[in-house]
DNA sequence: GACCAGGTGCCAG
DNA sequence: CTGGCACATGGT
């Protein structure tokens, strides 16, 4: 049991555990009361007990950026829709942040997420990291394997990590990133529609995965990934069937300017309680 | 065993 | 444009 103090980082309206367990990232590790989170190859070791974020390892600026401590939470909460279900989700998830993830690991992880439960996504992510990622000193998990690394593997190497039919997609996308067919960094300046169009050219990236990357890695807080839970919720609130795209447009309209935040709170609330809006 | 999971891509009508 | 189906894997 290592004893560490940790440098306090002011963090109002921030709930570390909730944020880490909300289905945005799948590789956070607990180590005797501290959380280890790898941001690319940068190790953060943090904990929170009813107050500031305590940082035992890692750069303060990296932590502030990654945990998005600059997000204007009061303004975001004020923009939540006023219906009872959204209010309930807000109250039960207060302090959950939309992280700023490195683009590649976010993209890759959500390619592997299709038709998988959160626990399975985590298992695949950890297998990929431990078998093919670079070691990082002091970290229980390895870094997410770089595009070039995955590009050099074969489909069976990825299937051995539990990816199933997703192996082909991750491999093909890794090769396109590695050979420069798409430049994830250059896309930062693209408009959201252009960004989405570009991401959706990649194998295994449909509208939902693209929106996850747009929200979780590119910080476009208006993006709304429509998965099975959000579809159920939107259906119950809208009381009219529709295509996934129609449901996304409904959500974008109804959830307001920070619809991505609302989406994440509703998703987590629904997934963990099983409750849906009552019409 | 059936059913479901933070979907995507393809094909028929 | 829409609906239906295959695609791997692992857990109730």
Image: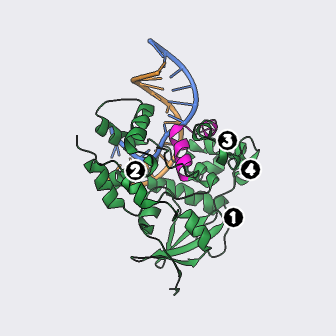
Chain colours: A green, B blue, C orange
Marks 4 and 2 sit apart, C-alpha to C-alpha, by 39 Å
Marks 1 and 4 sit apart, C-alpha to C-alpha, by 14 Å
Q: Secondary structure at mark 1?
A: loop
Numbered badge on residue A112:
none
Determine the image quadrant of residue A74.
bottom left
Q: Residue furthest bottom?
A: A3
> Which residue occupies 38% across, 56% down?
A77
Both marks 1 and 2 on one chain: yes
Residue A153: x and y in percent read 71, 50
**First reached walking from the N terminus: tag 3 or tag 4:** 4
Please tell me how crowded label 3 is: few (under 14), some (14-19), or many (20+) other residues with Cα within 10 Å.
some
> Which residue occupies 53% across, 52% down?
A216
Q: As displayed, is residue A80 above or below residue B2?
A: below
Asked if the residue under mark 3 is in contact with the one under mark 2, i.e. CB atoms within 8 Å, the reply is no
Both marks 1 and 4 on one chain: yes
> Which residue occupies 65% across, 42% down?
A190
Q: Which residue lies under the disc numbered 4?
A: A152
Asked if the residue under mark 4 is in contact with the one under mark 1, i.e. CB atoms within 8 Å, the reply is no
């Amino acid at each position: 049991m290592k004893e560490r103090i940790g440098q306090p980082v002011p963090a109002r309206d921030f709930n570390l555990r909730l944020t880490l367990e909300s289905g945005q990232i799948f590789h956070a590790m607990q180590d005797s009361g501290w959380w280890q989170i790898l941001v690319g190859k940068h190790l953060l070791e943090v904990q929170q007990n009813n107050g500031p974020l305590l940082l035992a390892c890692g750069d303060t600026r990296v932590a502030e950026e990654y945990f998005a401590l600059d997000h204007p939470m009061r303004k975001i909460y004020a923009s939540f829709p006023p219906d009872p279900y959204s209010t309930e989700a807000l109250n039960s998830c207060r302090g959950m942040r939309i992280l700023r993830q490195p683009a590649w690991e976010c993209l890759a992880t959500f390619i592997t997420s299709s038709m998988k439960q959160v626990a399975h996504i985590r298992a695949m992510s950890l297998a990929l990291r431990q078998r093919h990622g670079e070691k990082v000193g002091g970290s229980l998990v390895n870094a997410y394997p770089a595009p070039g690394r995955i590009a050099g593997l074969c489909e069976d190497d990825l299937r051995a990590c539990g990816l199933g039919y997703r192996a082909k997609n991750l491999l093909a996308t890794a090769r396109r990133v590695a050979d420069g067919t798409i430049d994830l960094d250059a896309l930062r300046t693209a408009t959201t529609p252009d960004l989405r169009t570009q991401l959706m050219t990649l194998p295994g990236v449909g509208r939902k995965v693209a929106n996850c990357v747009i929200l979780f890695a590119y910080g476009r807080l208006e993006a709304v990934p429509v998965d099975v839970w959000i579809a159920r919720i939107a259906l119950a609130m809208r009381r009219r069937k529709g295509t996934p795209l129609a449901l996304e447009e409904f959500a974008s309209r109804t959830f307001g300017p920070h619809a991505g935040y609302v989406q994440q709170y509703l998703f987590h609330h629904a997934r963990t309680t099983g409750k849906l809006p009552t019409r």
